[in-house]
């Protein structure tokens, strides 16, 4: 079992519940932070003092307040921590239930677990911690388990996401070529754009680009 854990969440109620779960598991050192910048500083200091955190539990979204933060989301914090301290285990802890953002956390940052906030949050958090600590396997809330088995999203790359984002803000397919060229995005030929948009329509069974954007929003792609 872990001996030193950091919780990053800006909601007191969630902090209290998560801390109690960790105490029940017999974890001796539990620290927490309401800001991602503060969390990163704590992780760096602990590493420098040769008393590193073994597990990071982080929410994904944080409300802005009077403080100016460099790291504005849990995803940004996770990205930095994984780059600097890849040995730290990470469990994301959020209300986000869209497939693309969740799957990206596992694929881009190789997080170790994902717990969706809901009625059974604390019980699932306990199970996630036990799974990650004792079996070294990935954990995801049962209602989201299908996401890791869904290969559709694997076919979508960053270029496709950019196209959908431009479509979602009103850039027409006809104007996409010049938009990509002005943004310095390549390839930006008309034929390539048509090929990718047609591929997306087929993957998501969209009737047109408007329908495609709607489906993409439902999946959390944009």
Image: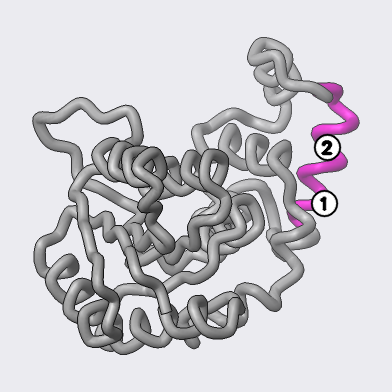
- Taking the image as shown, residue 168 lies to the left or right of residue 159, namely left
Q: Position of residue 80 (x, y in %)?
A: 48, 39
Q: Observer-nearest residue: 17 or 135?
A: 135
Q: Observer-nearest residue: 108 or 8?
A: 8
Residue 73 is at least partly visible in this image: no
At 65% from the left and 74% from the top, the residue drawn is 148
Which residues make up the magenta segment? 188-201
Residue 71 on the magenta span: no
**SS type, badge 1:** helix
Query: Which colouring convention does the figure follow?
Result: one colour
The outermost residue toward the top is 182
- Gap in Å between the C-alphas at discs 2 and 1? 8 Å
At 79% from the left and 57% from the top, the residue drawn is 155
Residue corresponding to mark 2: 194
Residue corresponding to mark 1: 199
At 70% from the left and 20% from the top, the residue drawn is 180
């Amino acid at each position: 079992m872990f001996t030193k854990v950091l919780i990053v969440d800006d909601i007191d109620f969630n902090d209290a519940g998560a801390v109690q779960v960790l105490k029940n598991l017999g974890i001796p050192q539990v620290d927490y932070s309401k800001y991602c910048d503060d969390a990163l500083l704590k992780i760096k200091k602990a590493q420098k003092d040769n008393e590193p955190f073994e597990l990071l539990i982080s929410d994904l979204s944080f409300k802005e307040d009077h403080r100016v933060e460099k790291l504005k989301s849990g995803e940004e914090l996770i990205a930095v921590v994984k780059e600097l301290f890849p040995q730290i285990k990470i469990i994301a802890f959020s209300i986000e239930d869209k497939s693309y953002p969740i799957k990206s956390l596992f694929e881009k940052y190789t997080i170790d677990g994902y717990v969706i906030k809901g009625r059974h949050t604390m019980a699932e958090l306990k199970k996630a911690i036990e799974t990650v600590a004792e079996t070294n396997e990935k954990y995801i809330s049962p209602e989201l388990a299908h996401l890791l088995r869904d290969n559709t999203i694997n076919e979508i790359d960053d270029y496709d996401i950019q196209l959908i984002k431009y479509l979602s803000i009103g850039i027409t397919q006809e104007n996409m070529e010049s938009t990509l060229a002005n943004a310095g995005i390549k390839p930006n030929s008309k034929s390539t754009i048509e090929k990718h948009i047609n591929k997306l329509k087929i993957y998501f069974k969209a009737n047109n680009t408007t329908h495609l954007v709607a489906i993409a929003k439902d999946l959390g792609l944009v």
